[in-house]
Amino acid sequence: MKSIQQVMAFGKNCLMHAGCESPGLDAEILLCHVMKVERLFLYTWPQHMLSKENFNSFLEHIHRRETGEPVAYITGFKEFFGRPFEVNQDVLIPRPDTEKLIEAALSFLPFENSASIIDVCTGSGCIAITLALERPKICVLATDVCPKALDVAARNIDNHQVGDRVLLRAGNLLEPCQDQENVDLIVANPPYIKAQAMPALMRDVRDFEPHLALLGEGMDGLFHHKRIIEAGIDLLKPGGHLILEIGYDQMPDVALWAFDKPMLPRFIRDEADNIRLVSYEKLGAC
Ligand code: GLN
C-alpha cells in the first residue's frame, strides 16, 4: 500500500524524466481524477493510503502521460471559460487563447438580446456552448466536417443543457449554413498551422491532437479563413461581425488580404500582446 504523498512523488519523478513541462501539476490532476477528489484533498490527507485499484490506474495514467498523451485526453475533460468540456482524440483540446475569442464575441452581444450566431469548426463545441451559456437568448448553429467531433459536441451540448439553442450541422466550414441569412455573428477557430510548422510542434500536440483540426491549408495556412470570410459575407446582416482566431505570427499574412473585402477588419491582441484575432464588421448598417 502506498500513500498519496508517496505516489505523488513517484508520479512527478516519472513525468519529470519523461520531459513533461509541468510534472507535479500533471501528476496531481491525474491522481485527483483517479481518486475522484479535489486537489485540496491531496494536501489535506498526504498519508491517506490508495486502494490497489486506484494505485494501478494511477500508474496506467502516468504511463500514458509519459508517452506524451495530453492530460485532458487521459482525464477526458478540459476546462474552458470556467466550465468543463468532454474531450477525446477526435477534437482539439480547448485552449486558453480561444477564451479571448469568447470575450471579443461577447462584446458584440448585449446580455438581454437575441442573436443568431454561427460557430464554424466547432470541435468539442466549446465556443458555441460557452456563448450560449453566457447569453441566454442567443441561438448558435455549430458546424464541423468530422462526424466523430460532432458526437463529442453533442454530448457537451447535453451536459450543459443548451440543446434548445445550440444546433449541430455536419459539413465543411459554412457549407451547411447556406439557408441562413441576417446572421449577427460568425465565429471560428479554424485549423491554421502551416504544414511546414507541423514537425516542430510539441509532441503532445503533434502526436495526439487531430491533424484535421490543426493543419491549415495553403502556403500561409489560412485558406480556411479566406473561405469562411468569402462565404460569411453573404450570410451576415449589415453591421454583423465575423471573428477568426489566427496564429501568433500570422497577422502579416492576414494583412495581405484582410482589406480586400467589403468588410472592415480590426486586429485584436491577447494578453501577451500578440495579434490572435481578426474581427470583421460587415459594412452597410443603417
Ligand atoms: N472550436 C474548437 C476550439 O476552438 C475546435 C477548433 C478546431 O477544431 N480547429 O477548440
Image (cartoon, rainbow, N blue to C red):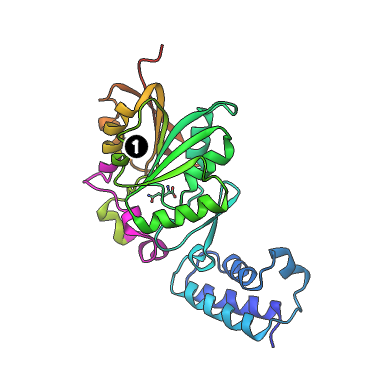
Q: Give the residue displayed 53% in from the left and 36% down from the top.
A: 103
Is 201 contained in the magenta span? yes
Give whichever of 133, 215 is nearer the camera.
Answer: 133
Is 175 contained in the magenta span? no
Tell me if residue 92 comes above or below residue 29 in the rendering.
above
Query: Of the residues shown, which amino acid type is indicated by label 1?
Result: Met
Q: Which residues are magenta?
A: 200-224
Residue 97 visible in the displayed image? no
| Label 1 CB sits under 8 Å from any ligand 1 atom | no
- How packed is label 1: few (under 14 Cα within 10 Å), some, or many (20 or more)? some
Give whichever of 123, 18 is nearer the camera.
Answer: 123
In the picture, measured across the screen, residue 201 lies left or right of residue 271, that is left
Q: Which residue is mark 1?
A: 251
- Which residue occupies the extreme left position in the image? 219
- Which residue occupies the extreme front position in the image? 164
Quadrant of the snapshot with the N terminus? bottom right
Horizontal and vertical percent position of residue 82: 60, 48
Quadrant of the snapshot with the C terminus? top left
